[in-house]
Amino acid sequence: MCGGRVGVMGEAWADEEPHRGARWGPRALPSATGDGPGSRGVEGLEPGLIIDDRYEVRRQLGLGGMSTIDEVEHRYTTRRLALKVLNATYASHSVARRQLLDEARALGAMRRPYVIEVHDAGFDGSRVYVVTEHTGMENPPT
């Protein structure tokens, strides 16, 4: 089995052996909508919450199907940053956790004028997060 990739909109993808013809398709992740099995409630982080003993949540910037983006302040440098955190249901799903960290690695490896800079990524209890520069956008794409 070859490695996976992440689609443009953040969905997880799997591939087959290249000699059989690469075939890409979405993997099953918990449902982001509805009340049925796999649905999730969207929860935000409370302002003042400290993440990984370094980042203090200031306010929510955006909300998506799998994650939220909050403005945080680094407790030691006082720098304002953006924190992307998987919603609770996805944080317990290994594919979604790996996908978010793969996204952080991919963005962290890029140096382009129109690509956000990744400052940190990791775990805080059951939370999986990525810290990026704060672009100043009120509703950034999640």
Image: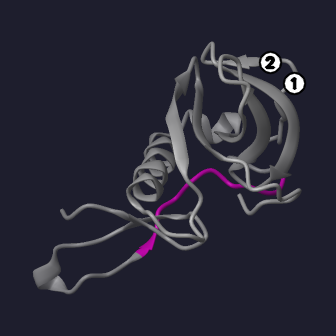
Residue 52, picture quadrant: top right
Q: Image point 65% across, 17% down: which residue?
A: 76
Say what amino acid the circle numbered 1 marks. Answer: Glu
Question: Which structural element holds mark 1?
Answer: loop
Residue 38 placement (x, y as % from top left): 68, 46
Residue at x-position 44% and y-position 63%: 111
Q: Which mark is residue 49?
A: 2
Residue 33 lies in the magenta-colored region: yes
Can I make out residue 43 in this image? Answer: yes
Give the extent of the magenta segment.
Answer: 25-34
Q: Do the residues under discs 1 and 2 have CB atoms within 8 angstroms?
A: yes
Q: Is residue 120 above or below residue 125?
A: below
Q: Main secondary structure of the magenta part?
A: loop
114 vs 61, left or right, is: left
- Decide which of 3, 41 is in the foreground and name it: 3
* Amino acid at dot 2: Leu
- Closer-to-camera residue (55/13): 55
Q: Please, is residue 9 above or below residue 71 in the view?
A: below
In the current view of this chain or complex, which residue is farthest to the left?
Answer: 19
Question: From the image, which quarter does the N terminus lie in?
Answer: bottom left
Location of the C terminus by quadrant is: bottom right
Q: Position of residue 34 (x, y in %)?
A: 83, 56
Q: Is residue 35 visible?
A: no
Label 1, on which residue?
46
Q: Residue at x 48, y 54 (%)?
A: 103
The image quadrant of residue 21 is: bottom left
